[in-house]
């Protein structure tokens, strides 16, 4: 039976939401494998990166979550929110860490501070010191999301599940600034339970870099699953980037980044992460195995970074024209959101903004979906698109 085509939630959007990454989890350095205290995860460094991205025109920024290292995501987001001008904040939420009604109130509070420039990255990994099998973790996330949505859109929470049993009134502080369902939910995951959760409840399916063929397979699979719920989702890509004036300079920068990394050191770094043995991480390892000797799995997609970090393990590497062409290929496939990063994060943020960002028509997902109250859903998106 022939598979249906990829169906995306926002086919009318010609550009992309271009986001950067705020290394809250001690993930910044000039060289991988050799930590420099100048790049430690503290308020001064991380807030500077975020505000730099805001000033340079990025439309969103991912604030990740980790128990082991770094800063608390929601505390950081609340502190930085009034200092920003245009950028959205994409805060990673590890479902189960906070009691859902209290989490809903916290998210609504930050959403009001940002006047709707708030998005949520749903995380379903184990809580520190605990371990659940995959299906149970995603079921817990499903329950958290359903409770959040009830609290944001209804006057009463009436919920009974495997993890939560709640009956309580909702109050004004729990109502989000954004309308039409509250902040957009971004989600990444590969297991059947993860795909099902995203298809039913989330708005943007985030993928880690893989070959274009494998990305298309993931997108088709998600489209089919979402159709079972009479829904569509948008697609996003979390990927590193190294752009220089010439391809040779970009490849030299990639090689320099790995100067202190050998196989032993790389494995030690990867094993530190809580998700080091997840299916998504194993897919990144598979990609490295099929790459060429210099680490490229397809033109301008370099897998070397994955030797020294868990999670997103590849970078777009090349000249401004080559990097832009690769991004355009992804956009032609139907990818509408990009979360870029590089090492060190501030300098790579500036380089990408100088060489590539002005050539991409960008928008903000909450504006595009009509979530901001002063932009009615039927209004043209001119206010949300930058040429």
Image (tube, grey):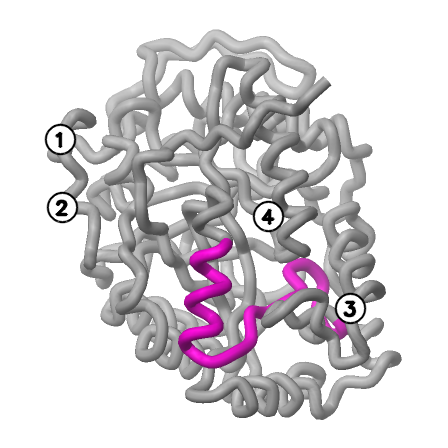
Marks 4 & 2, CB-CB < 8 Å contact: no
- How many other residues sit within 10 Å of disc 2, few (<14), some (14-19) or many (≥20)? few
Query: Circle 4 — which element?
Result: strand
The residue at 75%/81% (across/down) is: 294
Above or below, comparing residue 218 to residue 255 in the picture: above
Mark 4–mark 1 distance (CA, rounded to whole Å) = 30 Å
Mark 3–mark 2 distance (CA, rounded to whole Å) = 42 Å
Instruction: In the rendered structure, find residue 207 and report the number of the disc placed on it.
Output: 4
Rendering quarter of residue 317: bottom right
Mark 2–mark 1 distance (CA, rounded to whole Å) = 9 Å
| Residue 375, visible in the rendered structure | yes
The residue at 52%/78% (across/down) is: 318
Q: In this view, does 317 lie to the left or right of 172?
A: right
Instruction: In the rendered structure, find residue 291 and report the number of the disc placed on it.
Output: 3
Disc 4 or disc 3, which is closer to the eye? 3
Query: Circle 2 — which element?
Result: helix
Marks 2 & 1, CB-CB < 8 Å contact: yes
Instruction: In the rendered structure, find residue 379 and report the number of the disc placed on it.
Output: 1
């Amino acid at each position: 039976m022939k598979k249906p085509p990829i169906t995306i939630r926002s086919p009318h959007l010609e550009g992309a939401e271009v986001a950067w990454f705020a290394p809250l989890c001690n993930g910044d350095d000039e060289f991988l494998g050799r930590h420099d205290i100048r790049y430690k995860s503290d308020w001064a460094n991380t807030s500077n990166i975020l505000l730099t991205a805001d000033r340079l025109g990025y439309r969103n920024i991912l604030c990740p979550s980790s128990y082991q290292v770094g800063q608390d995501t929601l505390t950081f987001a609340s502190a930085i929110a009034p200092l920003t001008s245009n950028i959205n904040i994409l805060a990673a939420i590890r479902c189960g860490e906070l009691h859902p009604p209290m989490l809903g109130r916290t998210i609504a509070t930050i959403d009001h501070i940002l006047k709707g420039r708030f998005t949520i990255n749903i995380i379903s990994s184990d809580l520190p010191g605990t371990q659940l099998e995959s299906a149970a973790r995603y079921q817990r996330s499903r329950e958290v999301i359903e409770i959040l949505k009830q609290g944001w859109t209804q006057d009463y929470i009436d919920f009974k599940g495997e993890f939560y049993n709640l009956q309580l009134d909702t109050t004004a502080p729990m109502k989000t600034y954004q309308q039409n369902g509250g902040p957009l939910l971004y989600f990444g995951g590969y297991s059947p339970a993860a795909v099902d959760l995203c298809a039913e409840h989330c708005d943007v399916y985030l993928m880690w870099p893989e070959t274009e063929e494998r990305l298309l397979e993931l997108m088709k699979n998600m489209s089919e699953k979402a159709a079972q719920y009479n829904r569509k989702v948008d697609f996003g890509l979390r990927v590193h980037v190294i752009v220089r004036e010439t391809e040779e300079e970009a490849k030299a920068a990639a090689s320099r980044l790995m100067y202190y990394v050998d196989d032993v050191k790389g494995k030690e770094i990867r094993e530190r992460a809580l998700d080091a043995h997840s299916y998504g991480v194993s897919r990144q390892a598979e990609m490295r195995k099929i790459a060429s000797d210099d680490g490229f799995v397809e033109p301008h997609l370099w897998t070397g970074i994955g030797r020294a970090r868990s999670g997103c393990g590849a970078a777009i590497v090349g000249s401004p024209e080559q990097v832009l062409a690769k991004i355009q290929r992804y956009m032609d496939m139907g990818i509408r959101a990009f979360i870029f990063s590089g090492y060190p994060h501030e300098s790579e943020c500036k380089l990408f903004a100088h060489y590539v960002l002005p050539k991409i028509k960008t928008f903000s997902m909450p504006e595009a979906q009509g979530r901001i109250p002063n932009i009615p859903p039927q209004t043209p998106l001119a206010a949300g698109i930058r040429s």
